[in-house]
């Protein structure tokens, strides 16, 4: 049995080594190193059931893919229901590129992301590219904003709010004094 395991380990090592022989050496930049580090942290967190979500508090609007939504926001089919994974309150803007009101919201959304840098994370999710998530959250009209905070249920805003309306929602729902 030990000889079989040893033989398999050596065979796999040789196969991996021979596959990499034809590749040119690559210099790793800082982004690649950070990406590898994040991947290792996430894998270790998954093995130990520890949450290791890296939150970007830069004040930039972040566009989410399906996978990123599940990693950073919530599982779509969680038997326990909605559970926001982040530690920082966030807003997810469900939009589409062809949507006029969605397009008109871009400057306001960007301005608020900068204003609330470090306090609220501003995400966007394209419903055309992520129809399953839009369906799971019953997004029937765009823009729709979901305001989320740790240990709470999301608050929904349907339609394009004014700057004043969205700021009031941020202050009352996400950052109550």
Image: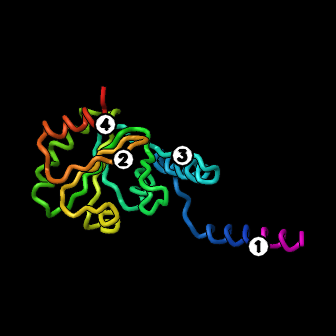
Which type of secondary structure does the marked residue at label 1 adopt? Answer: helix
Alpha carbon separation for disc pair 4 and 1 = 55 Å
Alpha carbon separation for disc pair 2 and 4 = 11 Å
- Specify which label sits upstream in the sequence, 3 or 1: 1
Q: Which residue is mark 3?
A: 51
- Specify which label sits upstream in the sequence, 3 or 4: 3
Bounds of the magenta segment: 1-11
Q: Which residue is mark 2?
A: 153
Alpha carbon separation for disc pair 3 and 2 = 19 Å
Dots 3, 4 in contact, CB < 8 A: no
- Specify which label sits upstream in the sequence, 4 or 1: 1
Labels in figure, total: 4
Q: Is residue 96 magenta?
A: no
Q: Nearer the viewer, mark 3 or mark 1?
A: 3
Which type of secondary structure does the marked residue at label 4 adopt? Answer: helix
Residue at screen point 30% across, 30% down? 176
Which secondary structure class fits the magenta region best? helix
Instruction: Find residue 4 and report its horizontal and vertical position in percent.
Output: 86, 74
Alpha carbon separation for disc pair 1 and 2 = 51 Å
Q: Say which quarter of the image contains residue 18.
A: bottom right
- Specify which label sits upstream in the sequence, 1 or 2: 1
Dots 3, 1 in contact, CB < 8 A: no
Q: Nearer the viewer, mark 2 or mark 4?
A: 2
Which type of secondary structure does the marked residue at label 2 adopt? Answer: loop
Alpha carbon separation for disc pair 3 and 4 = 21 Å
Q: Which residue is mark 4?
A: 174
Q: Nearer the viewer, mark 4 or mark 1?
A: 4
Q: Say which quarter of the image contains residue 58.
A: top left
The C terminus, quarter of image: top left
Q: Which residue is mark 1?
A: 11
């Amino acid at each position: 049995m030990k000889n079989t395991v040893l033989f398999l380990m050596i065979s796999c090592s040789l196969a991996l080594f021979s596959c990499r022989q034809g590749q040119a050496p690559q210099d790793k930049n800082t982004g690649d190193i950070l990406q590898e580090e994040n991947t290792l942290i996430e894998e270790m967190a998954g093995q130990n059931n520890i949450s290791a979500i890296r939150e970007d508090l830069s004040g930039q609007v972040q566009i989410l893919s399906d996978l990123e939504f599940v990693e950073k926001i919530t599982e779509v089919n969680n038997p326990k229901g909605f559970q926001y994974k982040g530690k920082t309150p966030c807003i997810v803007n469900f939009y589409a590129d062809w949507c006029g009101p969605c397009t008109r919201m871009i400057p306001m959304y960007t301005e608020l992301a900068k204003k609330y840098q470090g306090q609220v994370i501003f995400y966007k999710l394209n419903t055309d590219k992520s129809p399953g998530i839009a369906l799971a959250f019953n997004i029937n009209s765009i823009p729709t904003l979901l305001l989320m905070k740790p240990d709470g249920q999301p608050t929904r805003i349907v339609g394009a709010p004014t700057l004043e309306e969205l700021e009031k929602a941020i202050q009352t729902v996400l950052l109550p004094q």
